[in-house]
Image: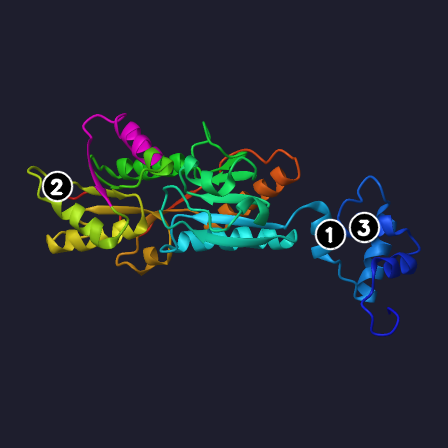
Amino acid sequence: MARGSARPTSRDVAQAADVSQATVSLVLGDKWRGRVSETTADRVRRAAHELGYRPNLAARNLRLGRTRTVLLVVPALTTEFFAGVYTGAARIAAAHGFGVLLYPSPEGVGPARNPFASAQAALDGVLASSMAADALTAIRGDQLPLVMLDSDPHGSLGAATVNLDIADGTRQVADHLLNQGHRRFLHLAADIPSWTFEVRARELAARLATVPGTSLHTAHTPISIEGALTATETALRTPGPHPTAVVCDDDKLAAGAYKALRRRGLRIPDDVSVTGVDDIALAAALDPELTTVRLDAELFGEHGMRALLAVLEGRTPDAGDIPVELVVRGSTAPPTGP
């Protein structure tokens, strides 16, 4: 143990492991590979553990000019999806000695105000989920590494972009409903100017267009149950046969669609099938349970944080979209009417 009650130092660890202080710094800073043998690294870690040594992160960060703090910007905290993104990002950050500050932008997906007097002085990097690419200008300036989540990879201001394969998720929904025999579709589309919702609308229209005899009506709505209720009621008042399938951009929109359909005396899924996106807890609470595209928010956050850490270390982040899964439940069935 260190002498008396004094806090053990790197010199104490070096003496206990019979190595130099420079070697201790390399090992405990996780920069030893290729420079120190694995046996020596194990001896240093064992000595540090037995002495109860903790590195002075504040002093080290001053030397490196880094705060080991990143900012996660999200449009809002009104959905559990972004809570999952934070959980996953914070888990990976903590494993690498970083802290994560969560900042719900007051302007939604629009320009985010700088939450600090100088973000460049307070942060090492920014992770932005479902934000417009130019919305982070006030926060990152021209200095901070930026990784965008759920964003257009072409023309992004970020050093890297991490996306869920939402296009494939939309195709899975369309194929599921088409294979059941549906041909009249209502798309409850989120009225948010976001790349992810543009992809959903484009992929749905493209997939349905490949099957003769299909029709698609799009109703834009805020992401809220009441907004979806109003949009669905308005769409159902349109003259002509009602849709046999309602494709929703979000599980909360599906809940609003449920209410509107039942007010019209329509049964789910006997008269109308309904699908959502996200697979939040609400999806299993609805009756019947909702067929929806499962987006693993925590895995999304993990991948995003790994990409940002790679950028900070000068490495190239892993490429490729994160797979998504259609979860089929009781809200979809073949249409029964003509």
Q: Say which of 257 and 51 sits in front.
A: 51
Other-residue count near label 3 (Cα within 10 Å), few / some / many at <14 / 14–19 / ≥20: some
Local secondary structure at mark 1 = helix
Local secondary structure at mark 2 = loop
Circle on res. 25: 3
Circle on res. 233: none
Could you tell me if the residues under marks 3 and 2 are in contact, i.e. CB atoms within 8 Å? no
Q: Which residues are magenta?
A: 199-221
- The residue located at (52%, 39%) in the rendering is 147
Q: Earlier in the sequence, mark 2 or mark 1?
A: 1
Q: Quadrant of residue 91?
A: bottom right
Does the segment drawn in magenta span residue 72?
no
Task: From the top left corner, tell me how far across and down residue 298 is, in percent.
Answer: 49, 51
Q: Say which of 83 and 38 sits in front.
A: 83
Q: Say which of 202 and 28 sits in front.
A: 28
Q: Amino acid at mark 1?
A: Arg
Q: Say which of 166 and 137 sits in front.
A: 137
Task: From the top left corner, tell me how far across and down residue 140 is, in percent.
Answer: 51, 40
Task: From the top left corner, tell me how far across and down residue 173 is, in percent.
Answer: 32, 39
Give the quadrant of the N terminus.
Answer: bottom right
Q: CA distance from mark 3 to mark 2?
A: 69 Å
Residue identified by numbered label 1: 60
Other-residue count near label 1 (Cα within 10 Å), few / some / many at <14 / 14–19 / ≥20: some
Circle on res. 242: 2
Lateral position of residue 62 relative to residue 318, left or right: right
